[in-house]
Amino acid sequence: MKVDVILGLQWGDEGKGKIVDVLTPDYQIVARFQGGPNAGHTLEFEGQKYILKSIPSGIFQEGKINVIGNGVVLDPALFRQEVDALEASGHTLTDRLFISKKAHLILPTHRLLDAAMESSKGDSKIGTTGKGIGPAYTDKVSRNGLRVGDLFHNFEEKYRIAIDRHKQMLSQYHFEYDLSELEAQWFAGIEKLKEFTIIDGEHFINKSLLQGDRILAEGAQGSMLDVDFGSYPFVTSSNTISAGACIGLGVSPHTIGEVYGVFKAYCTRVGSGPFPTELTDETGNLLRDRGHEYGSVTGRPRRCGWIDLVALRYTVMLNGVTKLVMMKSDVLDTFDTIKACVSYIVNGEETEDLPFDLSDNIEPVWVELPGWETDMSQMQSEDEFPEEFNNYLTFLEDELGVPISIVSLGPDRKQTIIR
Ligand code: GDP
Ligand code: IMO
Ligand code: MG
């Protein structure tokens, strides 16, 4: 069988978690393939709301295996908090959450290094989530990382060597810190981690495929935060695009089936970096208020703007999206006019292609469409969609060249229409 991929097409927080949860019943395994606790994936059902960080969003559907893949960076301290909170609300995980031996560990000093590096950048800081993501992936690529599988092989010594190296780096940043509490939390997390089944993820996934299982690969962040193709350097440190699923799970490109590209009916970004369609006016504030656009990890207000079809065309191309998923349409329910950016004017020239440097002086070219001014949040079928909404869908499908197969009309699992 195939690995279908769900990923974000904008700057993260598109609503990936909700869609993974909704589609999980069709799969046997859900596997996260990159990122770490910089992610915050929100799920709502039966009046409850959960925010998942490192645990895959298939965890609430009965009888499904969830895998943390080799491409993920895992912080044991935060993992323990997440597991404890879920167990306290009655969800047992140990028999259905497996962790790849090759996933890299975020050490307590990675978080300190993240903070030190950010403060050394002053005004040009990235606005990271502060979870140590960049330093952990840096250690992975520079071949200094510690992996989950190392827990069973001379771990104390490897840990000490890594921490001593980080301490030297921190002293170069003149960064003040107290490691003892962080370390205590971290080692408590290691004990928790050991309660779980640690697997050879790539073998597990490939054998499951051969056995006929369907696998859903869950992305984190968004394609515009991809370390190669995003708005560099204001990006995360992993490959968030569909190709990342092959690397982050150890599956061949031949195994990839559908690629679900999730996007909001408008656009948001949290952290620093260019955002061509950002609205710093009342309309931006209205989008933030109606969409409750505050970061699920850091609580920071998200920057809001109209949909950017130049960026979306680019990310649809990079990912080979086969099905589009439009989220948060209900947030636009009260607008009389909706705008979409169809091209950019860069240095006086109009282009439909994303330029190399998004921080160049970019002027969006807008198309205005009539709003539907109808509360859509309780609609049960696409037959109820207002004409103006159907026109917006058709306009986006024409611009992006891919069908919109799922429309989300609210945060709850049930507020989802599959077309
Ligand atoms: P993710 O990181 O891509 O999983 O997205 P987040 O969970 O960070 O952010 C999406 C937010 O929008 C969460 O608060 C969701 O509960 C909420 N949400 C998801 N889909 C919809 C929708 O269709 N309408 C509204 N109003 N909220 C939604
Ligand atoms: P989910 O999976 C939105 C952003 C940060 C910062 C940049 C680098 O919930 O969509 P990092 O901590 O990764 O080094 O930060 O990336 N960022 C996200 N923005 N959603 C996310 O995850 C994000 N994960 C990282 O705000 O700009
Ligand atoms: Mg999020």
Image (cartoon, helix red, strand yellow):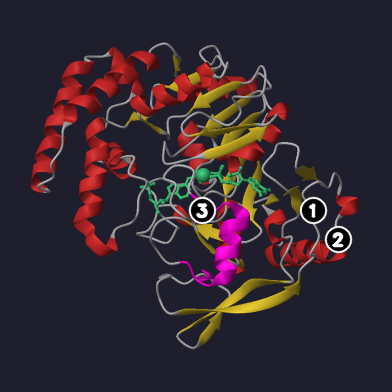
Q: Where does the image place residue 290, in percent across and percent down from the top left?
A: 63, 56
Residue at horizontal 59%, vertical 38%? Answer: 17
Using the image, determine if residue 281 lies above or below residue 389: below
Task: Specify the label residue 386 is tagged with.
Answer: 2
Q: Is residue 248 visible?
A: yes
Q: Is 3 situated left or right of 175 in this image? A: right
- On-image quarter of the N terminus: top right
Q: Over which residues does the magenta segment extend?
A: 275-294
Residue that protrudes farthest toward the right in the picture: 383
147 w.r.t. 319: above or below: above
Which of the 4 image quarters holds residue 41? top right
The mark found on residue 223 in the picture is 3
The quadrant where residue 208 appears: top right
> Do the residues under discs 2 and 1 have CB atoms within 8 angstroms?
yes
Q: Which residue is disc 1 drawn over? A: 376
- Amino acid beneath label 2: Pro
| Mark closer to the observer (3, 1) | 1
Circle 2 — which element?
loop
Of 412 and 355, which appears nearest the observer?
412
Q: CA distance from mark 2 to mark 1?
A: 9 Å
- Asked if residue 4 can be seen in this view, the reply is no
